[in-house]
Image (tube, rainbow, N blue to C red):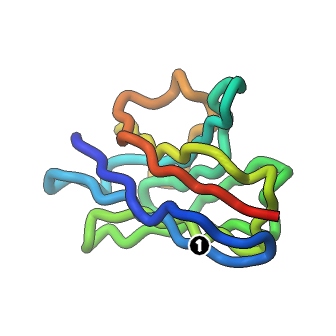
Amino acid sequence: VQLQASGGGLVQAGGPLRLSCAASGRTFSKYAMGWFRQAPGKEREFVAAISRSGGGTYYTDSVKGRFTIFRNNAENTVYLQMNSLKPEDTAVYYCASRQSDVAVFYYTQTDDYNYWGQGTQVTVSS
C-alpha cells in the first residue's frame, strides 16, 4: 500500500484546511486509517483514526470538535477536515494505514500501523 498525503499549507489561525490521503491498490476498504502529526522537536502524535468501514472514528482530545476524519472507499481516499486551526496545530501531518479484520475497529498508536505516507506540512500563523 502506498499513501500520498496532500493539502497542507499556510493558514491563519481560525481558518480551515482539508488534508487528503490517497491510497494505491484495490483493497482500500480493508484498511483502517489514521492521521498523525509531528511538530519540530516533538514526537509523532496521534490525531484521528477511522475504521475501515468509516463507522468508527476517534480523535485526540485537543482536536475534538474541530477536526473531522472521513473516508471515501470508492475513491481510495481518507480526509482530515481541520477547522478553527490554532498555531499549536502546526506540524507535519502523516496518514497511515493497516489492514483490519474488524470493520468498526480504529487504531491510535503509531505501532499499530504498517504503512505511512510522506507527510504534508501544515503551518498555522497567529
Residue 115: name its quadrant.
top left
Callout 1 amino acid: Leu
Is residue 102 at all visible to an observer of this figure? no
Quadrant the C terminus occupies: bottom right
Q: Tell me if residue 104 comes above or below residue 78 in the rendering.
A: above
- The front one of 98 and 7 is 7
Residue 75 percent location from the top left of the image: 26, 72
The foreground one among 31 and 19 is: 19
Q: Is residue 115 above or below residue 79?
A: above
Q: Secondary structure at mark 1?
A: strand
Residue 111 visible in this rendered orientation of the protein: yes
- Residue in the picture at 70% in, 66% down: 67
The residue closer to the viewer here, 100 or 65, is 65
Name the spot of residue 83 as percent of width and height, x first: 71, 74
Image: 95 above or below 55:
above
Furthest residue in direction bottom, as rendered: 15
Task: Return the x and y of residue 18 as percentages of the image width and height.
Answer: 53, 71
Q: Is residue 27 left or right of residue 15?
A: left
Quarter occupied by the N terminus: top left
- The image quarter in which residue 77 lies: bottom left
Q: Is residue 85 left or right of residue 34?
A: right
Q: Residue at x 52, y 63 (%)?
A: 9
Residue named by callout 1: 17
User: Residue at position x 59%, y 65% from top?
Assistant: 10
Q: Quadrant of residue 114?
A: top left
Q: Residue at x 43, y 55 (%)?
A: 52
